[in-house]
Image (tube, grey):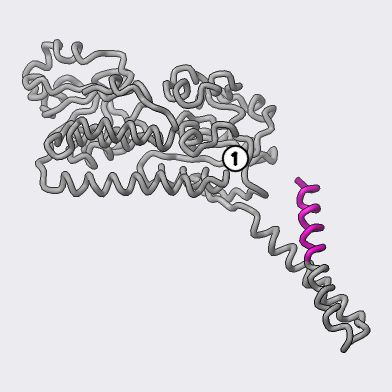
Amino acid sequence: MILTSLWKRGIIAALVIVLLASVVGCTSKESPTVGVENNEGQEDIVDNVVEETLEDEKIKITDHLGREVILERKAESLVSGYYITTSMLIALGLKDKVVGIEAKADTRPIYSLAAPEFLDLPNVGTAKEFNLEGTISLEPDLVILPLRLKEAVESLEKLGINVIAVNPEDMDLLKESLRMIGQATGTLDRAESLIAYYDEKIEEIEKLVASKDRKRIYFGGNSDFLSTATSKMYQNYMIETAGGENVASDIDDTYWANISYEQLIAYNPDIIIIAPGANYTKDDVLRDSRLAGINAIKENQVYVMPGDFEQWDSPVPSSILGTMWLTSLLHEEAYPYDKFVDDVADFYRDFYNITIDRELLNR
């Protein structure tokens, strides 16, 4: 990196000197000699131009820990310790720059579909057991980690490794994360294209649902049906944006809340949504005799969010599709399901460069 900087300084300095020499050459008939003082002035000009150019080339990013990260140049080799940011790297067209990712890559369908080479990459562990030494050995230009890996962020920083921490837990933070990565990797234009897509779709949805009645929705977690998304969760944002009301939005002191059957019966939701990848089924819920009196059960309004591509209830780049799915579910007369399927196909074609199997989508 030092040699590169010196080379750049040499090239810039040479260009400036050539330009100055040409000026001197043009005026030599009137001023046949150049004094020492003038030469010193030329050197000052060269130094100033070089310093300003080098400063302009640096990339400055403030991450979600409030740290200022300065890159000498755009990152060419990347490590992602978080499945959400790994998906972002695919969407930003950076899969060829990735040298290491989080563990359990084979559990992420989007990798097999859009970046099968990820399955053979070294893994750097999980949020619970992050592999610091393995990450260092990959010699990346940039490491991207979730906010909860603060200690690993600090350790990498002390070793002189560029690292940014992200916390994409709502749409605004998701956009900020995309912009950080786009800025660090020279793909900001593509990040802005994704963000423009979100803004366009959200504006459409908000207009569509503005005058609609809000149905009460219970969102069951993937590990336990009686674990539900609170007001602090991304799922809450999705429900409200799609024109629904999260029955558990009154809980604001935790993220996933464990509730009782009595509480769920009291909520009496109109619709029950099961998280993608849940370890229980729709039939398990419908056949639970303890829930027989709930409106959603009586009206057979229990749905599983699609998960054959990605878990749309988490803040991955394609999570906008989860909001769109919910909108179609709640207001199909205004946003037909067939139109939603077309939108999904277009999204994955444009941002992930894949053709999806439409039959994998479900209600």
Q: Main secondary structure of the magenta part?
A: helix
Which residues lie in the magenta part?
1-15
Residue at x 42% of width, y 28% of height: 354
Residue at x 20% of width, y 36% of height: 327
Picture quarter with the C terminus? top left
Left or right placement of residue 35 versus residue 327 in this view:
right
Q: Is residue 238 magenta?
A: no
Q: Quadrant of residue 15?
A: bottom right
Left or right placement of residue 75 versus residue 90 in this view:
right
Q: Name the residue carrying label 1.
A: 163
Where residue 172 sits in the image (x, y, percent)?
A: 37, 47
Using the image as rendered, state which of residue 334 and residue 299 is in the foreground: 334
Residue at x 30% of width, y 20% of height: 360
Residue at x 82% of width, y 74% of height: 22
Left or right placement of residue 256 versus residue 302 in this view:
right
Picture quarter with the N terminus? top right
Using the image as rendered, state which of residue 122 and residue 318 is in the foreground: 318
Where residue 157 sits in the image (x, y, percent)?
A: 64, 40
Left or right placement of residue 253 versus residue 247 in this view:
right
Where residue 19 sits in the image (x, y, percent)?
A: 79, 70
Residue 148 in sight from this viewpoint: no
Badge 1 marks a residue whose secondary structure is strand
Give, as a three-letter code, the residue at label 1: Val
Q: Quadrant of residue 301?
A: top left
Q: Does the magenta stretch include residue 6?
A: yes
Q: Is residue 172 above or below residue 9?
A: above
Where residue 350 sits in the image (x, y, percent)?
A: 40, 37
Residue 93 in sight from this viewpoint: yes
Extreme-bottom residue of the structure: 30
Q: Is residue 132 above or below residue 159?
A: above
The number of callouts visible is 1
